[in-house]
Image (cartoon, rainbow, N blue to C red):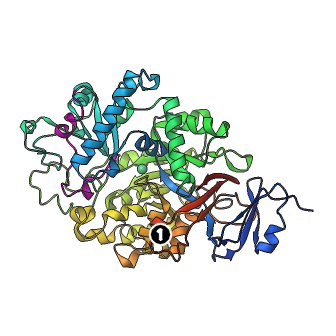
Amino acid sequence: MTAAADLVLTNAEVHTLGSPDETHEAVAVRDGEVVRVGRAFDVELLAGVETRVVDCGGRVVLPGFIDAHTHLPMVGRSLVNADLSAAGSPAEAVELLRERAAEVESDDETGDETSDDETGWVLGYGYDESTWDDSRYLTRDDLDVVSESRPVVAFREDLHTAGVNSVVLDRHADEMPDSGVQTAGDGDDGVGGDGGDGDTAGEPTGVVVEGAVDVLREATEPSREEMADLVRAAQSYATARGVTGVHDMVRGSRAPEVYRDLDEAGELALRVRINYWSDHLNALREVGLRTNHGGGSRGGLVTVGAIKTFTDGSFGGRTAKLTEPYADAAADPDATDEETGQWVVAPEDLRDLVAAADESGYQLTAHAIGDAAIDAVLDAYAETDDPGAARHRVEHVELASDEAIERFAESGVVASVQPNFLKWADEGGLYDARLGERRLRTNRYRDLLDAGVDLAFGSDCMPLGPLLGVDLATDHPNPDQSLTVTEALRAYTAGAAYAGFDEDRLGTVAVGNAADLVVLDESPWEADSIRDIAVSMTIVDGRVVFERD
Ligand SMILES: [Zn+2]
């Protein structure tokens, strides 16, 4: 007599998303594992008196989504602070920040102790000027209107650019690298504003980039309790979108500690594979934490992932490193930036880091968006013993050459890409402005898959939401690069699992695999709009972590 299941999902269309993708009527779960998948009759034999049996009414069940590139605390910050992704213009962004300023004000008055460390910061996250008619960065002139006494920061969606008010410049400009603080006369997008007296040449415009943004992030870093609140908010948001695991990028924050706190308390609602910033390499080596420690068969949802680094910036900030100049840099005679972007980490430094981390047995992952940056990472990985066995990854891989794609395939390096970035690749969009016709050669998913490259999907939380990514990947601005629904779903499940050494337990529905599942209201193979499909249930490790009422 077999022990009864804890949970049975039946009358469903269960897709294994294996190769081939098989469909079944039901799946049974016990002790966090899938114990049977097949015909409803056979699976329901495992239902005992204690078993929860869910009639899915014909709905689709998939392996849970794994987002291979997240910043969960950032998602939490947008949920707790001003969410500027909702703004349709600079004026709307300012209005959202004013509302947040009023909240911060009243928190301070009621003496809410948790806000002490924040010294009354008014923070907004996720603005994207490329979607605005008035397409420009937020400046100090905009943000001085929000508050003249409190520090105000509006982070751009990519986190490489932010707008600050005069209070922030007064308090923090000293700590910021000059290269990160734009001044009037730089000839960049942020300059000019409303043409007021802030235009004096050499005065900071309030637009800050890269290293200067890091200073702001450190200054506004949440305490352990605040971080726990952010993670709780973020995991609710993620599981409501069918996400059962994330590969989270962390740097100098309390997040790793808080993930383990919540896991130990049984409050963590999804799997977290932590990719640590290269700053932490020595500390990790010293305490003996290596890639793939934690989680796994021992239980526990937190695992040590890769060492994360940058090479270049973003197309939006014109800081992604290209082999040919930006299409709009040449048209801007005042541009002082390099016409081909900037190295955030120079190729020599990247090589040294890769060699050191690889030698100590770490998986590596490096942000590379421009073609020159992608080549630089592949060069650095090529000097390691076996980049494929180490599953070294490249994040973003937006403008990859034919040769680069071949090198991915030959070396086994994983391409970790974000299909939601395709929202910028349409005709007349941000990538069109920055890259011209090269926009059609960004995010070459079809070419990557056809070459045999391991493809993992993630969102970079811009915004977090796998079904949006699947929708965009199946309707690529360059139709030659579109994926089928099954291929796109696999990249968000098995593909991401592979990037985390988890393909034997996650990413497909199979007996013996962890019971990480999602139930969708509509079939992605049939829905008119995949991004609008509602999630009705999310299950992590056999536990129902989200259920729509
Ligand atoms: Zn990122």
Q: Write down the region rendered in magenta.
A: 126-148
Direction from residue 358 to residue 212 in the image, left or right: left
Give whichever of 198, 9 is nearer the camera: 9
Residue 141 is a magenta residue? yes
Q: Which residue is drawn at 38% across and 55% down?
A: 368
Residue 377 appears in the picture as rendered: yes
**Quarter of the figure with residue 63:** bottom right
The quadrant of the picture occupied by the C terminus is: bottom right
What is the x, y in percent for residue 249?
48, 46
- How many residues crowd mark 1 within 10 Å: few (<14), some (14–19), many (20+)? many
Q: Does dot 1 land on a helix, a strand or a loop?
A: helix
Q: Residue at x 56, y 35 (%)?
A: 258
What is the x, y in percent for residue 41?
80, 74
Q: Name the residue under label 1.
A: 530
Q: How many marks are shown on the rendered structure?
A: 1
Q: Which residue is drawn at 18% across and 46% down?
A: 190
Q: What residue type is labelled 1?
A: Ile
Direction from residue 497 to residue 472 in the image, left or right: left
Which residue of the protein is positioned furthest toward the right in this rendering?
Answer: 1
What is the x, y in percent for residue 325?
21, 61
The quadrant of the picture occupied by the N terminus is: bottom right
